[in-house]
Image: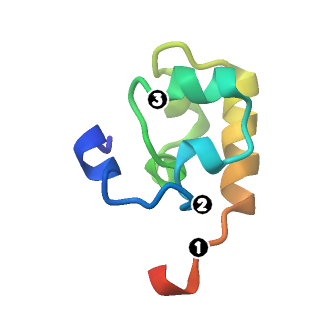
Amino acid sequence: MITNFEFVFLPEDHPDRLENSGMSKLFVSRLRINFTRLTDFDDMSDVEILRQPNVSRQMVKAIREARARLVFPASDR
C-alpha cells in the first residue's frame, strides 16, 4: 500500500492518480482510504482487492478497466 506521503510527488494531472482514472467519484473516494494510485493494484489478485474494506466486484472491474487504459507520460518511462 502506498501512503499519502508518497502521493505528494505525483503531479495533479498524472494518469496514475486514482482521481485521473476515469472511475466514478464514489469508487475513488472509497479506494482513497487505502490507496492513491492505480499501480497499487498491480500485484494484487481480484480476490485480494475484494478483501479490502468497502470494495465490491463492480469496483474491481472498474479498477481493472482503468488499469488497462493507463498510459504513463514519456518522462515516467
Instruction: Write down the residue under mark 1.
Output: 72
Number of numbered markers? 3
Tag 1–tag 2 contact (CB < 8 Å)? yes
> Picture coordinates of residue 45 (x, y %)?
54, 42
Cα distance in 3D space between marks 1 and 2: 7 Å
Mark positioned earlier in the residue sequence (1 or 2): 2
Q: Give the camera-side residue of 35 and 7.
A: 7
Tag 2–tag 3 contact (CB < 8 Å)? no
Tag 1–tag 3 contact (CB < 8 Å)? no
Residue 38, disc? none
Residue 6 appears anywhere in the view: yes
**Secondary element type, mark 3:** loop
* Badge 2 amino acid: Pro
> Picture coordinates of residue 44 (x, y %)?
48, 44
Relative vertical location of residue 34 with respect to residue 7 in this rendering, above or below: above
Instruction: Write down the residue under mark 3.
Output: 32
Residue at 72% x, 59% y: name it.
Answer: 68
Q: Give the camera-side residue of 54 and 46.
A: 54
* Badge 3 amino acid: Arg
Instruction: Write down the residue under mark 2.
Output: 15
Rate crowding at label 3 as few (under 14), some (14 to 19) or many (20 or more) other CA atoms within 10 Å: some
* Badge 1 amino acid: Phe
Residue 16, quarter of picture: bottom right
Residue at 42% x, 36% y: name it.
Answer: 35
Rate crowding at label 1 as few (under 14), some (14 to 19) or many (20 or more) other CA atoms within 10 Å: few
